[in-house]
């Protein structure tokens, strides 16, 4: 399934928020991303239809197994690319903003090569 960049951003946000708290609500997602409640509701509905998120019995947003796999992949790309750019001397704000844009488009092949390069570079 091809997920649009905006869907990936929602999954990553839910993942990040879930690392901080077991209870993630739509309002938390909206505040974190700066989006309105209707926008968040629509996006969550689409992600639910795709089997990537669900609401638990208390109404909290949870990633499904498939959603968590995708969210972790996106978050890893963001983290690794941010670190790479900061290691190159880019300030943290710019590095994270650039990583956020690139993480959605970089190929698996290139991303894996970056991870290998960073591991090899640390050995030196």
Image (tube, rainbow, N blue to C red):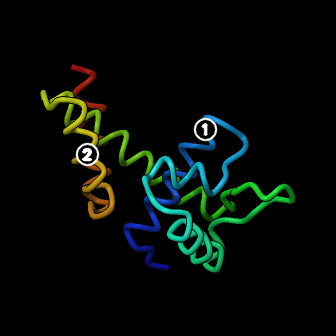
Q: How many marks?
A: 2
Pick the quarter of the image with the C terminus: top left
The residue at which mark 2 appears reads as 97
Spot occupied by residue 83 in the image (x, y as percentages of width and height): 28, 33
Residue 2, by quadrant, is bottom left
Q: Earlier in the sequence, mark 2 or mark 1?
A: 1
Q: How far apart in space, not on screen, are marks 2 and 1 (Cα)?
A: 20 Å
Q: Residue at x 49, y 60 (%)?
A: 10
Q: Residues within 10 Å of mark 1 (few under 14, many from 20)?
A: few
Query: Could you say whether the residue bearing mark 2 is in a helix, strand or loop?
Result: helix
Q: Residue at x 36, y 46 (%)?
A: 78
Spot occupied by residue 29 in the image (x, y as percentages of width and height): 55, 53
Q: Residue at x 28, y 40 (%)?
A: 96
Farthest-out residue, top: 124
Front one among 82 and 94: 94
Spot occupied by residue 52 in the image (x, y as percentages of width and height): 62, 68
Front one among 83 and 19: 19
The residue at which mark 1 appears reads as 19
Spot occupied by residue 47 in the image (x, y as percentages of width and height): 58, 72
Front one among 1 and 59: 59
Query: Could you say whether the residue bearing mark 1 is in a helix, strand or loop?
Result: helix
Q: Are marks 2 and 1 in contact (CB under 8 Å)?
A: no
């Amino acid at each position: 399934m091809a997920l649009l960049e905006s869907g990936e951003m929602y999954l990553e946000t839910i993942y990040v928020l879930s690392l901080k708290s077991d209870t993630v609500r739509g309002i938390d997602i909206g505040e974190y991303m700066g989006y309105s409640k209707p926008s968040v509701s629509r996006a969550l509905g689409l992600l639910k239809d795709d089997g990537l998120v669900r609401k638990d019995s208390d109404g909290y947003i949870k990633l499904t197994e498939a959603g968590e796999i995708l969210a972790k992949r996106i978050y890893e790309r963001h983290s690794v690319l941010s670190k790479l750019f900061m290691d190159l001397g880019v300030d943290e704000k710019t590095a994270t903003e650039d990583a956020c844009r690139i993480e959605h488009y970089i190929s698996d092949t290139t991303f894996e090569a970056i991870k290998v390069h960073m591991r090899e570079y640390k050995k030196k």
